[in-house]
Amino acid sequence: MGNVFVLDHPLIQHKLTYIRDKRTGTKEFRELVDEVAMLMAFEITRNLPVQEIDTDTPVTTAKTKVLAGKKIGLIPILRAGLGMVDGMLDLIPAAKVGHVGLYRDPETLTPHEYYIKLPSDIEERELIVIDPMLATGGSANDAIESLKKRGAKNIRLMCLIAAPEGVEVIKEAHPDVDIYLAALDEKLDEKGYIIPGLGDAGDRLFGTK
Ligand code: PRP
Ligand code: URA
């Protein structure tokens, strides 16, 4: 079964408080999401494999470490996932970025895919699917299925906030996918919003309604 990691680093939790706050405006919301994404990238990459190499320093030769093995692919789910890409690229600048465009029908809550563009070598990459919100789990589930259908083998899911319902959907459908969260909230409301959550992530990031 996939693991669920709640990244309760004090800086992440502090910033998440202001992300949740309804008084936080678009500019600050965007900046905070960017910063939390960077901090989460630090945690999510903690177990990447490294290999030892010899490096000539000005004084001697040292045994040093560099990242080994698979390269990273970031897969934001449009549109709100875009808000977390730059923060992650600050730490992993060589990552390739694929996009999956999904919107959730407000009535049925089912996701509809309208766009997909991926790096050509996704089967060789460690993919991190990014979306601020994991609510019913429908969107993340669809995105992960789409990636697997196209050959992806190693996938992690990174979200700011999840509802238990969404986590269960992903654990059930994709037991190979580890889930990284800044917070696991209480529940979904009758409209599929996460409680207490942060409202509509896409609207708050982009200033739409
Ligand atoms: C939001 C959010 C997730 C999805 C989560 O996107 O960014 O993609 O809802 O809900 P789910 O787990 O129930 O599928 P939305 O469909 O509102 O589109 P947007 O990013 O374009 O605002
Ligand atoms: N999508 C959002 O943006 N917010 C929620 O609470 C649920 C789905």
Image (cartoon, grey):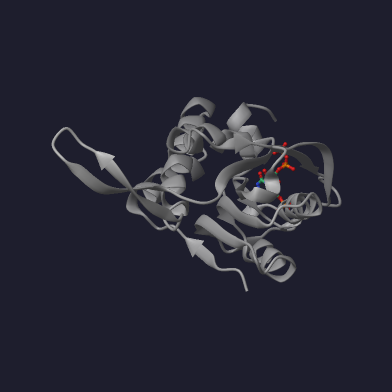
Q: Quadrant of residue 102?
A: top right
> Which quadrant does the N terminus fall into?
bottom right
> Which quadrant does the C terminus fall into?
top right
Q: Residue furthest bottom?
A: 1
Front in this rendered view, residue 52 or 179: 52
Q: Is residue 23 visible?
A: no
x and y percentages locating residue 162 in the rendered image: 59, 57
Left or right of 145 in this view: 170? left
Q: Residue at x 57, y 50 (%)?
A: 159
x and y percentages locating residue 23 in the rendered image: 49, 35
Q: Quadrant of residue 173?
A: bottom right
Q: Residue at x 61, y 44 (%)?
A: 199
Front in this rendered view, residue 6 or 143: 143
Q: Residue at x 41, y 53 (%)?
A: 50
Q: Quadrant of residue 73?
A: top right
Front in this rendered view, residue 8 or 91: 91
Q: Residue at x 62, y 28 (%)?
A: 206
Q: How many marks?
A: 0
Left or right of 120 in this view: 26? left
x and y percentages locating residue 79 in the rendered image: 69, 35
| The quarter of the picture showing ligand 1 | top right
Q: Is residue 10 visible?
A: yes
Above or below, 31 relative to 3? above
Left or right of 59 in this view: 113? right
x and y percentages locating residue 44 in the rendered image: 47, 53
